[in-house]
Image: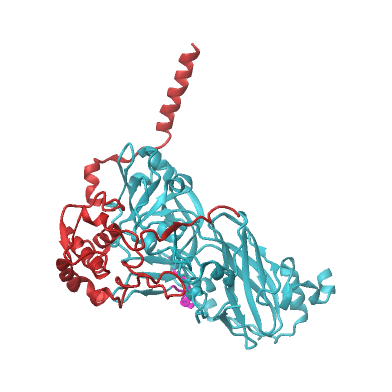
Chain colours: A red, B cyan
Amino acid sequence: MFTRSLLAVLLCTAVSAQADTPNLGRPIAPGDVAPWDISIPPDGTGLPPGSGTVAQGEAVYTATCQKCHGEKGVGKPNDPLVGGQGTLAAPAVAIKTVGSFWPYATTLFDYIRRAMPVTAPKSLTDDQVYAVSAYILHLNGIINENDTMTAQTLPAVRMPNRDGFVVFTRNQPR
Amino acid sequence: MSIRCRPPETDQVAGNGLLDRRSLFKAGAAIAATTGTARAEPLKIAPWMTEPGAPFTPYGQPSHFESKVARTFASLPGTTGTGSSRTPLHLLEGTITPNGLHFERAHDGIPDIDPDQHQLVIHGLVQRTLSFSLAALARYPMVSRVAFIECGGNGGTLYQPKPAPLNLQGLHGLVSCAEWTGVPLSVLLQEAGVDPRAKWVLAEGGDAASMSRSIPVSKAMDDAIVALYQNGERIRPGNGYPMRLLLPGFEGNMQVKWLRRLKLVEGPMMTKDETSKYTITMPDGKTQQFVFPIETKSVITRPSPGYQMDGAGIYEISGIAWSGYGKITAVDVSADGGKSWAAAALQEPVLSKALTRFRLPWRWDGGPAVLQSRATDDQGFVQPGREALLAERGNRTIFHYNGITSWGVAATGELTHVYA
């Protein structure tokens, strides 16, 4: 008797928890989310098929990126992408670029694919994004001239400032 | 009554003319009774009293006499919507920012989203992958909350070695406060069924830049809101129409606008804006990352640069204070560059993670002064001086400046941004 009433209480609790909120989200198959699922974590999960070389990337860069980021990524009018390695600690003037500052190469692919070029975001093919990522990494001396970036090679690139980040901890009362 | 009988100087509670916060109205009365001012002109009938006024309009606008109360903005070279617009804090009072003056930050323009086509998808480490239409979310039980939003880069110019010759809007105009209304994110996440392995949520906007940030699940389940309304009306396009993430107290960049996607994941995605931006590089070259809360901060809004003092006498020092950790419990004001401090009155209501208005009467003697404010919150955090902040942090970042701001008052009555 006791067990049965306890079970009834538990069932009611479970049912009412479901019924308490509207549950108006429509189920969508995980595969159908794929066109939106463009975030790439450091381990490279979700990187698409395809590849790009440094030489191919130079062509994409010159045609598409140079106007804002300067010849060979030196910057101006907008952010520099190249140089500054070894400048993060005082007393040097900190120059923060992909090469000197960014901890993960996957972020480069993620960001270029979603947001660049600023006048036509999402217009580059996956091959072009791999290629221009390769070119920027090569300009920074991080990969060789003959390297090719793919879903396998890009996450394996070790960025110079990979270990340069610590978690901000002053979020507790003093 | 007793105030009138005392010499006004006895109200002074700190150097250079700061008066007791409780004497605000009485002191004003005493001055009105004792200060000689020019006699007012004889009264006339104004023309707007002799003819019918303007007709009604569907959506009201401020008086055309107030056209200077406007945002200022700048965009990166070659773009028109990659940058920010700033709230004219020096021209506003109270704590709520009018919707047309709320600051905006956009990474590739403000999208023109059709609300009927917009969807919010929750996926990743969940039991049920779900898509919510705006119409569906509008049927959910809602909550309202007054909250400030501040860009993590607000005040960044105060890291520079010399004081930037800017006014309050140019220095700190990337903070605003509104009443936000929407659906608690925890409700939607519970419906999706979050896998215990999920510790982070990737939030992504439906703008051209698809701006994205990683947010701890603990915050998402705590006080996060999928906000649909801003001060009673649907969120303005520049602030995320038709929906934005509200994360009370956290830096603005994380409160993703035009919210279209939430992915539950085990680790942070390390997006561009949580690695190369919104981080604090320390003098040793190490960079502090995931600086979520906006730290305890305040500024004096009036008088501030651009305000012209009109002769010696009583002025109200008015300002705003805020903390991403909780409620403001005290604001101290100095008129002598931090040598002495007086406690300001806090205007009710004082709400957690919202702007708080403070006020203090000041008898300006017509001489040089340096005005400062210093906030304290209910978690024990005290706003640091600029020198103390830079001594700890250096100036290798532009983010999360919460040090004290100083206004120099010259004998001419002009105010400027100074370091003190």
B83 falls in the magenta region: no
Tell me, yes or no, if residue B242 can be seen here: yes
Task: Residue B305: give x, y in percent of width and height.
Answer: 55, 80
Q: Nearer the viewer, residue B333 or B228?
A: B333
Task: Residue A101: give x, y in percent of width and height.
Answer: 36, 65
Quadrant of res A13: top left
Q: Nearer the viewer, residue B400 or A15?
A: B400
Quadrant of res B368: bottom right
**Does residue B30 sit above or below B276 in this rendering?**
below
Range of residues picked out in magenta: B60-71
**Does residue B96 sit above or below B132 in this rendering?**
below
Question: At 26% from the left edge and 73% from the top edge, which residue is drawn?
Answer: A73
Report the number of discs. Answer: 0
Q: Nearer the viewer, residue B327 or B119?
A: B327
Task: Residue A40: give x, y in percent of width and height.
Answer: 28, 53
| Left or right relative to A129: residue B102 | right
Question: At 47% from the left edge and 56% from the top edge, which residue is drawn?
Answer: B292
**Does residue B48 sit above or below B55 in this rendering?**
below
Tell me, yes or no, if residue B52 can be seen here: no
| Left or right relative to B324: residue B59 | left
Quarter holding the C terminus of chain A? bottom right
Magenta segment, prevailing SS (helix, strand or loop) = loop
Task: Residue A58: give x, y in percent of width and height.
Answer: 17, 70
B63 falls in the magenta region: yes
| Left or right relative to B331: residue A165 | left
Residue farthest toward the bottom in the current orientation of the protein: B412
